[in-house]
Image (tube, helix red, strand yellow):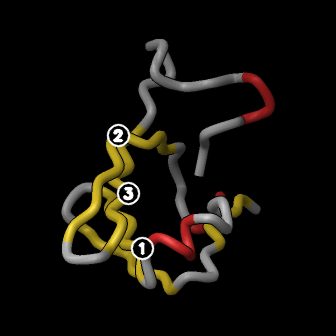
């Protein structure tokens, strides 16, 4: 289970996580489990929009350097 840093709660009341065109909305107490996804994702970009924090995930390319093997840090 991964948790988004609690300091995010002070910045925004809502966080939207996007995977492709699909938006998954979570309130400030966010937890994302690897079990929710059948593939591994990495953070593509993060930005603010209308007092929300938008986290866009992209599918990790296992053969590239955009993913991290060290204890799965950065994976959702």
Q: Which residue is mark 2?
A: 44
Q: Secondary structure at mark 2?
A: strand
Q: Residue at x 41, y 81 (%)?
A: 14
Upstream in sequence: badge 3 or badge 2:
2
Residue at the location (50% across, 86% down)? Answer: 27
Element under label 3?
A: strand
Tag 1 near tag 3, CB within 8 Å: yes
Does residue 35 show up? no
Foreground: 38 or 25?
25
Q: Earlier in the sequence, mark 1 or mark 3?
A: 1
Choose between 69 and 50: the one closer to the eye: 50
For mark 3, what is the residue? 55
Residue visible at 71% across and 59% down in the picture: 2
What's the CA distance linking mark 3 and mark 2? 8 Å
The percent coordinates of residue 11 (x first, y second) are 46, 70
Quarter holding the N terminus is bottom right
Write down the quadrant of residue 36 in the picture: bottom right
- In the image, is 25 to the left or to the right of 36? left
Q: Earlier in the sequence, mark 2 or mark 1?
A: 1
Q: Where in the figure is residue 60, as x and y percent of width and height? A: 45, 33
Whether 65 is drawn above or below 34: the answer is above
Return the residue at label 1.
15
Which one is in front in this view, the residue at disc 2 or the one at disc 1?
A: 1
């Amino acid at each position: 289970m991964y948790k988004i840093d609690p300091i995010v709660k002070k910045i925004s009341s809502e966080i939207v996580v996007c995977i492709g065109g699909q938006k998954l909305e979570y309130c400030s107490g966010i937890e994302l489990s690897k079990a929710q996804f059948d593939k591994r994702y990495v953070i593509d970009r993060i930005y603010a929009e209308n007092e929300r924090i938008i986290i866009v995930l992209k599918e990790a390319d296992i053969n590239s350097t955009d993913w991290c093997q060290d204890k799965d840090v950065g994976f959702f």
